[in-house]
Image (cartoon, helix red, strand yellow):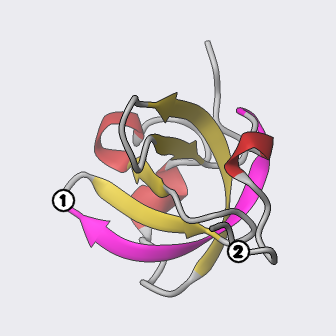
Amino acid sequence: MADPARRPLSELREGETVQATITGHQPWGLTAELNEYEAVGASLDIMRRGSEPGVQRFVQELPPVGGIVDLVVGEVRTWHREPGIWVNLTAPGHGRA
C-alpha cells in the first residue's frame, strides 16, 4: 500500500525537477531516493554522463550520502515485474542534443 504522504509514481514525468536524498555512492555514480514520491529505484550515472552540463558538478564533488539535491527525471523505465520502475536522473542544466 502506498504511503499517503508521498505522491504516486504515476505522477512522475520526464523533465520534472525533483528533490532527492543521496542513498549511496557507486563506482559508476549515485543512487537516490525521490523525496516526494513512493519508493523507486533511482540513479545518476556520472561515469557515462559526466561531461553533460550540470552533471559535471557531481563529478567534481559528490554530494554526501544523506545529502538532498535537486535532480531532473531523465527517463522512467518500467518492467513487467515488481519493483517495476527505475528512474534515470540527471542534473538541472543538463544538455539534450
Viewed as shown, does residue 31 lie left or right of 93?
left
Tell which circle, 2 or 1, labels the residue nearer the N-terminal end: 2
| Place of residue 56 in the rendered image (x, y in percent of width and height, measured from the top left) | 49, 50
79 or 51: nearer the eye?
79
Q: Is mark 2 on a helix, strand or loop?
A: loop
Residue 60 lies in what quarter of the image? bottom left
- Main SS category, magenta section: strand
Residue ID at (80%, 74%): 4
In the rendered structure, the answer to whether residue 86 lies left or right of residue 75 reads: left
Q: Tell which residue pokes out farthest to the front in this image.
A: 1
Q: Is residue 63 above or below residue 66?
A: above
User: Which residue position holds label 1?
Assistant: 27
Residue at 56% of width from left, 84% of height from top?
67
Please state the total of marks drawn on the protein image: 2
Residue extent of the magenta highlight: 14-26
Mark whose residue sits in front, 2 or 1: 2
Please identify the quarter of the rendering in which residue 53 is found.
top right
**Residue 27: image x %, image y %?**
18, 59
Which kind of residue does numbered mark 2 sit on?
Asp
Q: Is mark 1 on a helix, strand or loop?
A: loop
* Quarter of the image that includes the N terminus: bottom right
Taking the magenta stretch, the answer to whether it contains residue 33 is no
Name the residue that disc number 2 marks.
3
Q: Residue 90 carries which label?
A: none
Mark 1 packing: few (<14 Cα in 10 Å), some, or many (20+)?
Answer: few
Q: In percent of the image, x 40 and y 63: which residue is there?
A: 31
Classify residue 47 as left or right of residue 79. left
Say which residue appears at 24% left-offset and 64% top-offset.
26
Q: Which of 33 and 82 is in front in this view?
A: 82
Question: Extreme left residue here?
Answer: 27
Quarter of the image where the C terminus is located: top right
Disc 2 versus disc 1: distance between alpha carbons? Answer: 31 Å
